[in-house]
Amino acid sequence: MGSLSIWHWIIVLAVVLLLFGRGKISDLMGDVAKGIKSFKKGMAEDDDVPAPKASEPPRPLPHQASPAPETEKKAV
């Protein structure tokens, strides 16, 4: 009852071909292939980027600067 037979798949394929046509499906598959290629290229470029040097300590951002110690504050 729940599984589809070969005839069901043939009908579904025929409906898809009628709706989209052969040209649109091949264009779509070409676009998918281009997307996969650009994704792989982007992943390869990420591997080529050198890692930051570990000898340099990280610099704090201006809003992360620590307040002055209590001993340096003037008494009013």
Image: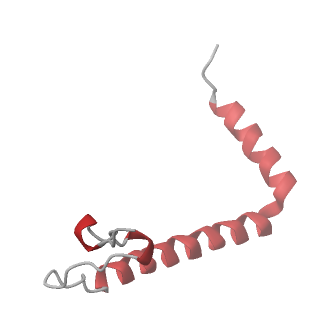
Q: What residue appears at the point 26 percent right and 68 percent down from the top-left corner?
A: 69
Q: Is residue 10 left or right of residue 40?
A: right
Residue extending farthest to the right is 19
Residue extending farthest to the front is 76
Q: Position of residue 40 (x, y in %)?
A: 43, 74
Q: Position of residue 24 (x, y in %)?
A: 78, 66
Q: What residue appears at the point 32 percent right and 71 percent down from the top-left corner?
A: 73
Place residue 31 in its image quadrant: bottom right
Which image quarter holds the C terminus?
bottom left
Q: What residue appears at the point 63 percent right and 33 percent down from the top-left corner?
A: 6
Q: How many marks?
A: 0
Closest to the observer: 67 or 4? 67
Q: What residue appears at the point 82 percent right and 61 percent down from the top-left corner?
A: 21
Which image quarter holds the N terminus?
top right
Q: Is residue 18 left or right of residue 5?
A: right
Q: Position of residue 38 (x, y in %)?
A: 51, 78
Q: Is residue 25 left or right of residue 53?
A: right
Closest to the observer: 24 or 47? 47
Place residue 10 in its image quadrant: top right
Q: How is the image coloured?
A: secondary structure
Closest to the observer: 20 or 42? 42
Q: Position of residue 22 (x, y in %)?
A: 77, 64
Residue extending farthest to the left is 55
